[in-house]
Image (cartoon, grey):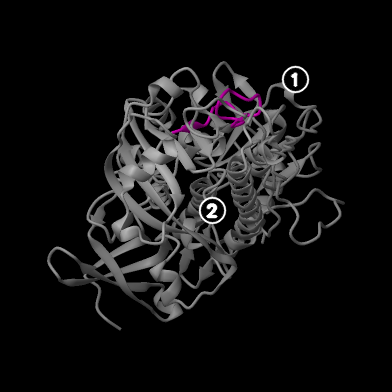
């Protein structure tokens, strides 16, 4: 076994939004982490375009929501517009629900912003060390009793190799994950769906867009997206056959529409493959996959990055519990149990998004070829409402695992249930569901009361013991205003035990018989897979 040059509780591989969010979450939980990224700096490409309402709830807990919103587009850009060319009028439009206006189900609003605008804010959110230009080239797991894994890193600047010993490795190194490949973890799903090119350019397109803002403009000849409030554009289109000799400025001009006098100043061009896969396993011993390493989601609908952010929100409190000693290692198994069904459901929806988007574009190109116009030919878009009103998928995911105590007498649910549908979200306090947003006080939500610990929400704190000793588990008892008890399916002395990730771990509709300390100890030890009550 190679000798390590450094030791750290958690090694994060990958410096994109998912890895950077994990770094901030672990620091909040008092866990030292080292993040390594093979590239020398943060990516200058815009890539992901949407921070949805659930991700913004997580960033609100981290104190980042205001910073992210300040650098993002105004809410009216939370809309998709469909046009024959950017110069033409809309033939259809759809709002991004939870983005273009507040929704009553959340204390926050999602935003349209580019990934290269988001990542610096995430990098500044924690003090944990970062090593850019350091590529993981090997992993060697120690014997179980040694409680560690050694990662071999190659420094691209110096050419030297170093070894880092970690208790756990969190792999967030992208769709072509080196870690996943080294461990031999297979994938399921359609795989590579198509090759695309992103062209980043400068041009004054305000005459067609200023009065009708949108985060995305779909046309039969590609997708246009404004990049930053102060300017800049991207054009996404299938990669042409002779990409090496393409006239990108000319292609953008033709996509803008005939007769345009606008000349695009091309700044960057990136070719990429739209992948659609889910890893067969999210955990391999002391290595855990997250983000695109665990599931590569097509970009249509803006689900990929946000699903990865939810991954690490689920995982990091569990890692902290194991490392701090108040959770058993079996708790980490519930990460895959809970998040893999969400990944499969999200993948199915995103693949459907993509096929339907391509179908609409292809159908419209054919109509234009045969002389049709938007005013003379009806354009059917049955998918706009279904695939851009996603609160059911975003807020409705419900977990079924050993880290959730089902209500007494509740029938077991079939495998694969517990993940919300695309459009419909019905708030629920049933164990496994995200705790609904309710105002506890002015500007303070139930979601603000969770995150740093387990939280017991109850209309009657005295009956549960305001000073209940629950060591070693971190727990806070939070008064729930009596007017919310009914909507939470609680009696006047009932309670909800909410996990640090905001999902309900247990529910007592009324106070159970016996000592409250014993009841809570049993619930916490069962959920965390450790302790005397397990």
At x 35% / y 67%, what residue is drawn? 166
- In the picture of the structure, the residue carrying the numbered disc 1 is 483
- Is the C-beta separation of discs 1 and 2 under 8 Å? no
In the picture, which quadrant includes the N terminus? bottom left
**At which x and y percent is residue 284?**
50, 72
Q: Is residue 504 left or right of residue 137?
A: right
> Would residue 394 be counted in the magenta stretch?
no
Frontmost residue, 132 versus 471? 132
Q: Which sits in the foreground, 248 or 97?
A: 248
Neighbour tally class for label 1: few under 14, some 14-19, many 20 plus, Cα within 10 Å: few
The residue lying toward the viewer, choosing from 284 and 483, is 284
Say if residue 194 shows up in the picture. Answer: yes
Q: Is 515 left, or right, of 108 in this rendering?
A: right
Q: Residue 88 in the image: x percent, y percent? A: 52, 27
Residue drawn at x 48%, y 52% is 316
Q: How many residues crowd around disc 2 within 10 Å: few (fewer than 14), some, or many (20 or more)?
A: many
Q: Which quadrant of the structure image shows residue 64?
A: top left
User: Which circle's residue, 1 or 2, is located before the other in the chain?
Assistant: 2
The image shows residue 340 at horizontal and vertical percentages of 61, 60
Q: Magenta segment: does it hold 93? A: yes
Position of residue 41 in the picture relative to residue 220 (left or right):
left
| Residues drawn in magenta | 92-112
Quarter of the image for residue 13 reads: bottom left
Image quadrant in which the C terminus is located: bottom right
In which image quadrant can residue 467 be found?
A: top right
196 to 477, vertically: above or below: below
As helix, strand or loop, the secondary structure at mark 2 comes to loop
Specify the principal SS of the magenta part.
loop
Q: Which residue lies under the disc numbered 2? A: 298
Residue 43 visible in the picture:
no
Q: CA distance from mark 1 to mark 2?
A: 42 Å
Residue 235 point in image, percent of width and height: 41, 42
């Amino acid at each position: 076994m190679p000798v390590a040059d450094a030791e750290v509780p958690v090694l994060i591989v990958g410096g994109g939004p998912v890895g950077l969010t994990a770094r901030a979450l672990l620091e909040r939980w008092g866990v030292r982490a080292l993040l390594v990224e093979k590239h020398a700096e943060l990516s200058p490409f815009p890539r992901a375009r949407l921070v949805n309402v659930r991700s913004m709830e997580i960033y609100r807990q981290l104190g980042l929501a205001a910073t992210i919103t300040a650098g993002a587009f105004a809410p009216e850009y939370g809309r998709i517009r469909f046009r024959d060319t950017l110069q033409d009028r809309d033939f259809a439009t759809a709002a991004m629900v939870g983005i273009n206006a507040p929704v009553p189900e959340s204390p926050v609003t999602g935003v349209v912003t580019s990934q290269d605008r988001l990542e610096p804010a995430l990098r500044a959110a924690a003090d944990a060390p970062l090593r850019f230009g350091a590529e993981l080239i090997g992993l060697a797991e120690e014997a179980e009793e040694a409680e560690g894994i050694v990662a071999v890193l190659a420094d691209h600047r110096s050419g030297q190799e170093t070894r880092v010993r970690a208790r756990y490795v969190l792999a967030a190194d992208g769709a072509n994950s080196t870690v996943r490949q080294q461990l031999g973890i297979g994938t399921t799903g359609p795989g590579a769906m198509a090759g695309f090119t992103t062209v980043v350019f400068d041009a004054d397109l305000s005459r067609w867009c200023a009065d009708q803002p949108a985060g995305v403009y779909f046309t039969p000849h590609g997708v246009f997206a404004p990049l930053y409030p102060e300017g800049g554009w991207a054009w996404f289109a299938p990669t042409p056959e002779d990409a090496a000799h393409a006239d990108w400025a000319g292609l953008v001009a033709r996509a803008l529409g005939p007769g345009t006098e606008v000349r695009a100043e091309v700044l960057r061009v990136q070719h990429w493959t739209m992948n659609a896969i889910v890893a067969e396993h999210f955990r391999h011993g002391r290595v855990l996959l997250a983000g695109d390493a665990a599931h590569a989601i097509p970009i249509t609908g803006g689900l990929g990055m946000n699903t990865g952010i939810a991954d690490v929100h689920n995982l990091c409190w569990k890692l902290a519990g194991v490392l701090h000693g108040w959770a058993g290692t079996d708790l980490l198994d519930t990460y895959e149990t809970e998040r893999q069904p969400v990944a499969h459901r999200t993948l199915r929806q995103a693949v459907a998004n993509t096929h339907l988007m391509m179908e609409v574009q292809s159908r419209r190109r054919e109509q234009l070829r045969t002389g049709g116009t938007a005013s003379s030919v009806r354009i059917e878009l049955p998918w706009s409402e279904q695939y851009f009103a996603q609160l059911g998928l975003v807020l409705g995911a419900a977990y079924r695992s050993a880290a959730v105590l089902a209500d007494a007498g509740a029938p077991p649910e079939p495998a694969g249930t517990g993940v919300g549908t695309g459009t419909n979200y019905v708030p629920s306090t049933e164990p496994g569901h995200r705790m609904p947003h309710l105002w506890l006080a002015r500007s303070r939500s139930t979601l603000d009361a969770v995150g740093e610990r387990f939280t017991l929400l109850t209309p009657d704190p005295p009956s549960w013991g305001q000073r209940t000793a629950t060591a070693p588990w971190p727990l806070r008892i939070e008064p729930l205003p009596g007017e919310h008890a009914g909507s939470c399916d609680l009696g006047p002395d009932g309670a909800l035990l909410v996990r640090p990730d905001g999902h309900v771990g247990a529910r007592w509709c009324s106070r159970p018989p016996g000592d409250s300390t014993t009841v809570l100890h049993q619930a916490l030890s069962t959920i965390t897979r450790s302790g005397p009550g397990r």
